[in-house]
Image (cartoon, rainbow, N blue to C red):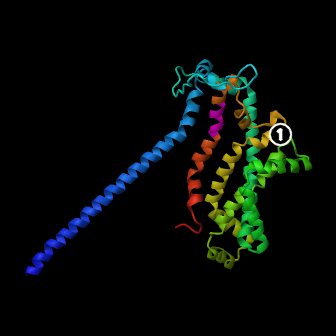
Amino acid sequence: MSGNRKGKPQREFSAKRVKNAAKRKKRIHTVKIALATLVAAAFAVLFLMPIILTITNSFMSSSEISANYGSVFATNSRGGKVYISEKVNLKFIPDMVSFSQYITVLFKSPQYLLKFWNSVVLVGPIVFFQLLIAALASYGFTRYRGRIREIIFFSYIILMLMPYQVTLVPNYLVAGWFKTLDTYWAIWLPGIFSPFAVFLLTKFMRRIPTSVIEAAQIDGAGEWQIFKRVCMPLCKGAICSAAILVFIDYWNMVEQPLILLSDAEKHPLSVFLSKINSGEIGLAFAVATIYMVPSLLVFLYGEEYLVDGITYQGGIKG
């Protein structure tokens, strides 16, 4: 009896200690989540600040923009940049909302819309045909293994790791050899055969369970049917992820048009944004806002597919 009397308080004390430890652990976990949320919110504000600044400043008048940012773009008598002695005023709210910049861009100066159309013409075929070629090549790399194919795939990875600045000179020489310089083909061909989408889709397809493909073969499906009805539906997320990343990458290209297209009339809008002068500061804000719209729409529309394509490991979902 005495042993039971002594054991009961000890058990109650142990249970209370475990309960307090669990509460303490829960409080620490809550504090960690709160700190992580604050840090993430701070970075989100930091990353969104340039976008918000661009959008709000696009509604400022030319005089207000010049008063706030004119010293940044000031030049000396020789055309060079000058030392900024004045303090630049970053304003997020305009004194008076003005649509004059958008009126100039959309109605008075069709050259900006023409350059926007050049961007669409350059990027659209690259995204479509790169994904088409990548899907077919990825299926080949997935279904048929061998040393030669692995060497080719390894070469794809090496090419993918090379920046544009490294491949621009070879692309220029090859374009000159094929006589495609100063034509859209000089941009299309390197973009269409870019290895990024091939690498991404191959890694994704190789995670598809072999049992799924074997089941389709038992049902009498051929290679084309397996590719069309098995692999492509399972790779929908990866294809959308590749499409979003490829679109954003080539939508913002600057080096390739500058080197491969000598005719300024064929340059995309991204090239204009890289060559802003002191008389076009206000227009640059408006053009940049318009230029961001397709990227934002593509990202917002395909955000779910982008996350799914990155996190999904292959196989059939329940």
Q: Quadrant of residue 292?
A: top right
Q: Is residue 44 above or below residue 66?
A: below
Tell me the element at label 1: loop
Residue 318: percent from left, percent from top: 52, 67
Residue 262 vertical placement versus 10 (above, below): above
- Please provide percent x and percent y for residue 187: 80, 46
Asked whether, in this view, residue 197 is left or right of residue 37, the answer is: right
Camera-side residue: 233 or 180?
A: 180
Q: Residue at x 58, y 65 (%)?
A: 313
Q: Which residue is mark 1?
A: 261
Reply yes or no: does residue 290 show up in magenta. Answer: yes
Identity, as a three-letter code, of the amino acid under mark 1: Leu
| Left or right of 87 in this view: 109 | right
The location of residue 269, given as percent across then percent down, is 72, 35
Residue 82 located left or right of residue 33: right
User: What's the magenta region?
Assistant: 286-293
